[in-house]
Image: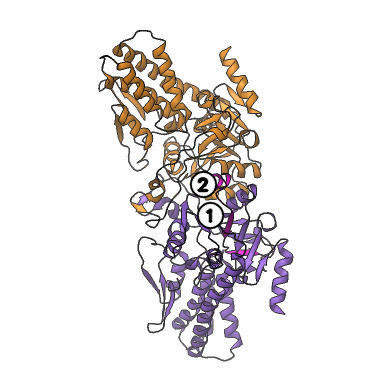
Chain colours: A purple, B orange
């Protein structure tokens, strides 16, 4: 599944599969400018750290159409990029992509907006293709950790839909299957946005992968009964010490996994590791609209006037609870401060 | 709130506030015979261990209307009572109430069905009234454990709606408020049936008690941030060693509470403690229809054809994770095998 993020060259717009209404209907959403790209990011037409990164890269290209080429276009562009980078606070891939495009611009000397548009579009398409290759490499490294017959629990959707395609956590599952290991999946439904029930179940079932949905509340019982052999999740940001922010509820899954001796893995490309964030305590946690909790479809589930918390992420302490961080460069092991430093040093060498 | 379970003497039927459609609308459901009572129990028109007990007591009375007074009415009645007692497997109050009515019958010698009807209806009304008194006693004992300014997390609905009125866990909260301690409540939404979002929020807001709803996934983050000072939940069955079955997800809340040093209390009347169940491993866990997970109102949240787990309860190990079991006779403390033995011995003395 790779056509959920697609740049339409003829129309000069970014076309996104609208993940808000899956699995009921497959509808597409056009991003034609910065505002519509930010809207798509904020309302979660598209979500998942790597997919957010790729979307933001195309979003930089779209911003160029709005700034003209008259005097001051650079300042106008800079302002648009800053707006785009601030669309969501937790996933570091958003800032990563905008920073990467900005660096490319700065390196291009005296470019015109038209020339920069070509440079950026080509780079966005490269990032898009690279993301799939990175996921496949993660899938090979992580897949080798899964054993034949394992049931793998995952939380949220860190799949094809959360990336340019293939997936991080679900890429590991696809990697295990490619190695001939028969694994099955328990998808936690992942309230409030229900990424597990709606998106993970949808994309795995579409690929013929054995998946069962369970309420988030069932995590303890399923592990207590020995029904889970591995946990693999994605991440929105990994701090320099290996603490990992991911969808709300992930931390609890990790604590329960530890209790029952179930290995808990985070699948995250290097672009999700933010060495500028020292620890999990430094990761900003997005506080989203209560309406995501209050309404499921047209059904209101809480009484009018009752307040609601809707924190979107939590942080899992790396060295204590994460058995391994699966990256495109291999599986990092605790202590993560050292293994993360090492993997980036190798990349730089 | 006590009119959600009401025996209508004029019409000879049991009238239940339909908890399936709260908080959207307040509608009532008539139980006129065993079949409609079992339907109400199984589909959760009424739920919550003590409320199930009171409903079953009235259900025994309704069964009498169906067996006539011709030869063999005793066998026919016995069969109806067995059906009723088997309506739901986990909450011991169902069996407790049917056993209690059966014992009353056996103690009544050669009664006619008409005479037994009077005896049973009077006893059911007594149980109904006693349940409220028991809850208030629990509220006094438990309320004294809460401190001024505490935020109390609760899971599912162990409130007025789960009992004859007042509540077990929510009775403790009402008890704390009666002692003049300003406490506030976080109601976990409690997927899949959403008893927290729908019922706990509804009855607390109706009483003007400060309540905020959060997704079950937020338990870890809320405790990590120090936003929870106490946890109080109900129980569907407490084993002789203090292990407590309660709504799915409770076990996870207890594990997280232990991690963050938050006291975790179970509020359960003695009728919920089953000395015939040695440990939590002996408590049957109900496996309910996937449709409760799949549909929220008219909205389907999983793709067609994807299987779903819907285990309704889990078991929290008593001695390890439960700080106290709040009963009408006081607060039991670990080791529970001893404190439970003692409280029943005192009752018998």
Asked if marks 1 and 2 touch (Cβ < 8 Å), the reply is no
Q: Chain letter of disc 1?
A: A
Query: Taking B220 as reference, is B48 above or below it?
Result: above
| Labels 1, 2: one chain | yes
The first of marks 1 and 2 along the sequence is: 2
Per the image, is B143 magenta?
no
Report the Cα–Cα distance between label 1 and label 2. Answer: 20 Å
Residue under the image location 57 percent in, 70 percent down: A93
Using the rendered image of the protein, determine whether residue B126 is visible from the camera's viewpoint.
Answer: no
Q: Magenta span has A229? A: yes
State which region is magenta: A219-242
Give the residue pinned by disc 2: A218
Q: Secondary structure at mark 2?
A: helix
Crowding near the residue tagged with mark 2, few <14, some 14–19, many ≥20 C-alpha atoms within 10 Å: many
- Where is residue B166 shown, x and y percent of the image? 46, 28
* Vertical position of residue A165 compared to residue B206: above or below: below
Q: Quadrant of the C terminus of chain B?
A: top right
Give the label, 1 or 2, closer to the camera: 2
Q: Residue furthest top?
A: B110
In the picture shown, does residue B311 fall above or below A326?
above
- Is the residue A296 above or below the residue B3 in the image? below
Residue identifier under label 1: A311
User: Could you say which disc has been placed on residue B168 in the image?
Assistant: none
Q: Nearer the viewer, residue B130 or B255?
A: B255
Find numbered disc 1 in the image and state the secondary structure of the residue it sits on. loop
Residue at coordinates 37% horizontally, 70% vertically from top-left? A28
Output the chain of dot 2: A
Nearer-the-camera pick, B279 or A287: B279
In the figure, is residue B22 to the left or right of B96?
left
x, y percent for residue B310: 45, 45
């Amino acid at each position: 599944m790779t056509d959920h993020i697609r740049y339409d060259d003829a129309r000069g717009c970014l076309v996104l599969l609208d993940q808000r209404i899956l699995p009921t209907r497959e509808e597409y959403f056009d991003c034609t400018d910065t505002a519509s790209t930010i809207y798509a990011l904020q309302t979660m037409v598209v979500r998942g750290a790597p997919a957010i990164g790729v979307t933001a890269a195309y979003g930089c290209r779209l911003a160029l159409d709005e700034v003209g080429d008259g005097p001051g276009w650079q300042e106008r562009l800079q302002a648009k990029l800053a707006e785009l980078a601030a669309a969501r606070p937790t996933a570091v891939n958003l800032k990563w992509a905008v920073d990467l495009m900005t660096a490319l611009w700065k390196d291009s000397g005296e470019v015109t907006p038209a020339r920069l548009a070509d440079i950026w579009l080509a780079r966005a398409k490269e990032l898009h293709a690279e993301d799939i290759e990175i996921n496949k490499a993660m899938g090979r490294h992580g897949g080798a950790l899964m054993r034949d017959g394992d049931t793998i629990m995952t939380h949220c959707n860190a799949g094809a839909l959360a990336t340019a395609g293939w997936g991080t956590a679900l890429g590991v599952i696809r990697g295990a299957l490619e190695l001939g290991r028969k694994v099955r999946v328990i998808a936690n439904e992942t309230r409030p946005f229900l990424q597990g029930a709606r998106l993970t179940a949808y994309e795995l079932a579409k690929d013929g992968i054995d998946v069962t949905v369970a309420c988030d509340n069932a995590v303890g019982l399923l592990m207590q009964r020995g029904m889970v052999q591995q946990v693999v999740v994605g991440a929105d940001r990994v701090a320099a010490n290996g603490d990992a922010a991911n969808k709300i509820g992930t931390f609890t899954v990790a604590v329960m996994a530890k209790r029952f001796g179930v290995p808990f893995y985070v699948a995250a490309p290097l672009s999700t590791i933010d060495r500028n964030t020292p620890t999990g305590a430094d990761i900003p946690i997005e506080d989203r609209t209560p309406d995501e909790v209050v309404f499921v479809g047209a059904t209101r589930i809480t009484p009018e006037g009752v307040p609601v918390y809707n924190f979107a992420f939590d942080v899992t302490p790396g060295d204590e609870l994460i058995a391994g961080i699966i990256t495109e460069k291999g599986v990092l092991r605790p202590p993560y401060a050292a293994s993360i430093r090492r993997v980036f040093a190798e990349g730089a060498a």
